[in-house]
Amino acid sequence: MKDLTVGSIVKNILQMALPIAAGMFFQTLYFLIDLYFVAGLGDAALAGVGAAGNVMFMVFAATQVVGVGTVTLISHAAGRKDQNDAILVFNQSLALSASCAALTVLLGYLLGPGYVGTLGASAATVAAGIEYLQWFLPSLALQFALVVMGSALRGTGIVQPTMVVQVLTVILNAVLAPVLIAGWGTGHPMGVAGAGLASSIAVLVGVVMLALYFHSLEKYVGFVPALWRPKLATWRRLLRIGLPAGGEFLLMFVLMAFLYWILSRFGPDAQAGFGVGMRIMQSMFLPAMAVAFAAAPIVGQNFAAGKSLRVRETFALATLIGSCVMVFLTLFCQWGSAWVIGAFAKDATALAVGSQYLRVISWNFLASGVVFTCSAVFQGMGNTVPAMISSASRLVSFVLPVLWMARQPHFELIQVWYASVASVALQAVLSLWLVRREFKRRLLPVAQSVPSSA
């Protein structure tokens, strides 16, 4: 366990953020590798995988329920120096994640085909999306165990093992993707099904590797089978923090589904271009997200230890670091969006849609970085409701205006992208106001939070 209540805050952020960013980058390569090989199967396959992959947002929302609750409660236990509570929370998180994984598989196979059918712009797109989802679902279910173990380590200030596992699983996925998708070496290409199977095998290997690490090397928290029997009091603690955080991700899923529904009237080429642009945008968000992921346990440990000044400083420094990264990425997208999209989309329409999307949407990168950092502060302080309120504001500031614009005779896609930029800017302003309110309510005034020895 690493004590994050002492030492340089900038050093703590960077020491955690760099491995997290590396791990998240390689995690994103899962999707970019699949995307590259699936693109060779045609626009219908590309659009289908993009539509089916949107289910990932719903599953990630559920993993956030368990993961955010785990990292917050374990960071609080570490800040209080209460190892027994950290062990209890970790093992109860495993029990809760197993239940969620089983439910994911059940609902995915029952309801997934109908969901994909509502988003596909053509019969071929729907068929490809359903086939991909059937083989991709096991990887989504296994994400629960992966997230819980990674969150437990992050709550104690340890991030390197998770990064190493993510790198190795991506290498495995990179090897399996051409073999299963295109049939390299076997002569039996599986197409989009191979993309889903490659991810499922790679995630399974990652779960096994992290489990072996906990069994053999982890000393602060570990597997205690006697604590796997559900304890409702601990589950309530996890869900009280995790459910609003999961709701925040679920709202992202709703927004993505809404965008695919709007795009369906423009055809599969437009959906394919948007799918590529969205995946690339997500990969560009990784550095700022890594800074936010690092800030959450730092805030958590210091909040539990009563060090209010360090909580405020962590927020300010994380916001500054994330903002610098996002400004650089915005400038890059203004000149390099067509080049990046062209590596994945060859169709002229898909290339045009993806390039335009990335170029316009990059103007909300800075605001998005601020939103990420604010959410991390809410997680660290154990109150994730404000973050969900912030995300929910986009249902008003984005969905309603786009629905109105879609009814107009000269509706164009670029109007959707500009509406998104405006809505994220408003969300960032709201998030900053909510953070300020949370600091006033739950932290000591600055003058009182400075130790007398200072």
Image (cartoon, helix red, strand yellow):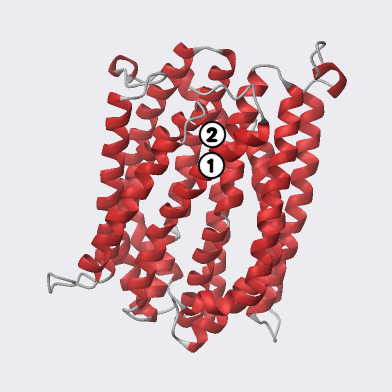
Q: Is residue 400 visible?
A: no
Residue 120: which quarter of the image? bottom left
- Label 1: few (<14), some (14–19) or many (≥20) C-alpha neighbours in 10 Å: many
What residue would you read off at disc 1? 246
Q: Position of residue 31 (x, y in %)?
A: 40, 61
Residue extending farthest to the right is 447
Please say if 160 is above or below 279.
above
Residue ID at (75%, 31%): 312
Residue 222: which quarter of the image? top left
Please say if 452 is above or below 190.
above
- Label 2: few (<14), some (14–19) or many (≥20) C-alpha neighbours in 10 Å: many
Residue ID at (53%, 80%): 265
Please say if 40 is above or below 228.
below
Q: CA distance from mark 2 to mark 1?
A: 6 Å
Give the left or right position of residue 305, taking residue 199 as reference. right
Given the image, on which type of amino acid does mark 1 rest? Gly
Residue extending farthest to the bottom is 348
